[in-house]
Image (cartoon, helix red, strand yellow):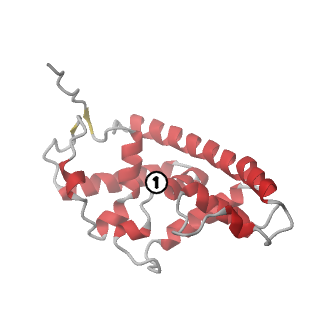
Amino acid sequence: MSAAPLLVDTVYKDHIHAIRCALSVSAKAMGHVAAKWQRDYQAGYRVSSAGPDMSRAERFTQDCMTRLLLHRNLSREHWAVLVIRFAPPLQAQGRAVGDQSEVGEMEEAMRICLAHLTHPVSQEFTGWCLLRWSQRMPAGRGKWVEWEGKTSLSLRTLHRYSSENIYKPMVTLENAAIARAKDLLEQAALI
């Protein structure tokens, strides 16, 4: 005999779910339809506000309000790192790679994060490492050997540099942003 799933009366399952929903608003606005498995998936919690029968429009409105809450109350750096890490890729939003409609927010987030980092090596390499960290590297790219011959530094030095000066600070910034977002969502009784 298995136990019944615990039903909690919250708007979002947890803080990560809320962040992902808030940052996917633009994909929803473009008419992106979730896959069948996503529509059928039952996570074991009940969505409140409008109850389990929350319409698609009500869910979209709630996600927009959550996005606004986070955007207004997080620092620029925290918002930028969440955009880079959790916003759906443009291709997943049913857009062509060259579509400019949401590129501006991602580019701005990348600029903010690049300014947050120290880069004694080229800014191009730092940007490349930031793309690798964000897991947004285009297919077929992201191999360390791409940098062989582009710099006088060894690949080992570049790898160590990226670990110490990019990945670690970005993970620290991401953890701080998630913790702050979680506090805001709890204060608003959304999780």
Amino acid at circle 1: Phe
Residue at horizontal 72 percent and vertical 54 percent from the top: 162
Give neighbour class at mark 1: few <14, some 14-19, many 20+ (Cα, 10 Å).
some
Q: In the image as oriented, which residue stretches furthest toward the top? A: 1
Residue at horizontal 55 percent and vertical 44 percent from the top: 177
- From the image, which quarter does the C terminus lie in? top left
**Can the viewer see residue 115?**
yes
Residue at horizontal 23 percent and vertical 34 percent from the top: 44
Residue at horizontal 40 percent and vertical 40 percent from the top: 15
For the residue pair 185 and 142, the one nearer the viewer reads as 142
Which residue matches tag 1? Answer: 86
Which secondary structure, mark 1?
helix
For the residue pair 56 and 128, the one nearer the viewer reads as 128
Question: x%, y% of residue 27?
Answer: 34, 65
Q: Quadrant of residue 7?
A: top left
**Can the viewer see residue 80?**
no
Question: x%, y% of residue 82?
Answer: 51, 52
Q: Quadrant of residue 11?
A: top left
Question: x%, y% of residue 184?
Answer: 45, 40
Number of marks in picture? 1
- From the image, which quarter does the N terminus lie in? top left
For the residue pair 119 and 62, the one nearer the viewer reads as 119
Decide if residue 170 is on the left or right side of residue 140: right
Q: Quadrant of residue 50?
A: top left
Q: Is residue 146 above or below residue 78?
A: below
Question: x%, y% of residue 43?
Answer: 25, 39
